[in-house]
Image: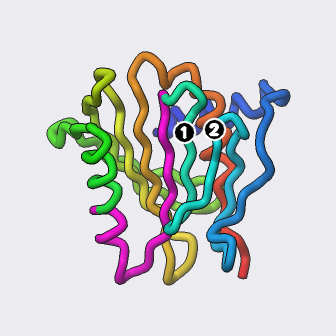
Amino acid sequence: MKTLLAAIALATVLIPGVSLAETLAFPSEAPIAEITIPDSWSPEETDGGIQATSADEAIYLAIDIADEKTSDKVIDDAFQFLKDNGVTVNGSTQKRSEDTVNGLAMLNFDWNGTDEEGPVNVGLSMVPVRADRMLVVTYWGQKGQQEKHADELLAIISSLKAVAR
């Protein structure tokens, strides 16, 4: 993940012409975080956060808000969403890493898996943004297709920030 984040940061410097949407603060009624996602990814606010899918549907990204009482449910819901969408996660391939983005600590878990299109990468990251709130980032990308979105994905993740109260 550190290599991915470094590549994303480099891409944002080398490719300034990438068309990005305006920064989206979420949840809209009382924002705790913000992120910039390309318009082509059709970002939208959900009941629990924000989600987006690359135009070619090779990558799905969701960021849900959780607190101490709801974090287990949010994580369970993320895995249920993947299962409901035909994603099978191979638990024996789990890798754990830690990163920092804009001063936010990220605890990352990554797996290999499959969906109806074939092999996929699946990721789940936990990002504390306040003492009482965290973000749960869910990633699902098709192997062989997701690589062409590396620059966009790095820019998206690099733009994630906590919103000051």
Position in image of residue 62 (x %, y %):
49, 52
Say which quarter of the image contains residue 88. Answer: top left
Task: Estimate how packed mark 2 is, as few (under 14), some (14 to 19) or many (20 or more) residues with alpha carbons within 10 Å.
Answer: many
Name the residue beneath numbered marker 2.
41
Name the residue beneath numbered marker 1.
53
Position in image of residue 151 (x %, y %):
64, 28
- At 80% from the left edge and 50% from the top edge, which residue is drawn? 22
Position in image of residue 147 (x %, y %):
51, 21
Q: Pointers 1 and 2 in contact (CB under 8 A)?
A: yes
- At 68% from the left edge and 78% from the top edge, which residue is drawn? 29
Q: Is residue 66 magenta?
A: yes
For this orientation, the residue located farthest to the left is: 92
- At 68% from the left edge and 54% from the top edge, which residue is drawn? 35
- Determine whether, in the image, residue 34 is placed left or right of residue 77: right
Q: Is residue 108 above or below residue 14?
A: below
Disc 1 and disc 2: Cα gap in Å?
A: 5 Å
Amino acid, disc 2: Trp
Q: Is residue 42 above or below residue 12?
A: below
| Camera-side residue of 96 and 31 | 31
Of the 4 image quadrants, the one containing the C terminus is: bottom right
Q: Which residues are magenta?
A: 58-76
Badge 2 marks a residue whose secondary structure is: helix
Say which quarter of the image contains residue 152. Answer: top right
For this orientation, the residue located farthest to the right is: 17
Q: Is residue 79 magenta?
A: no
Amino acid, disc 1: Thr
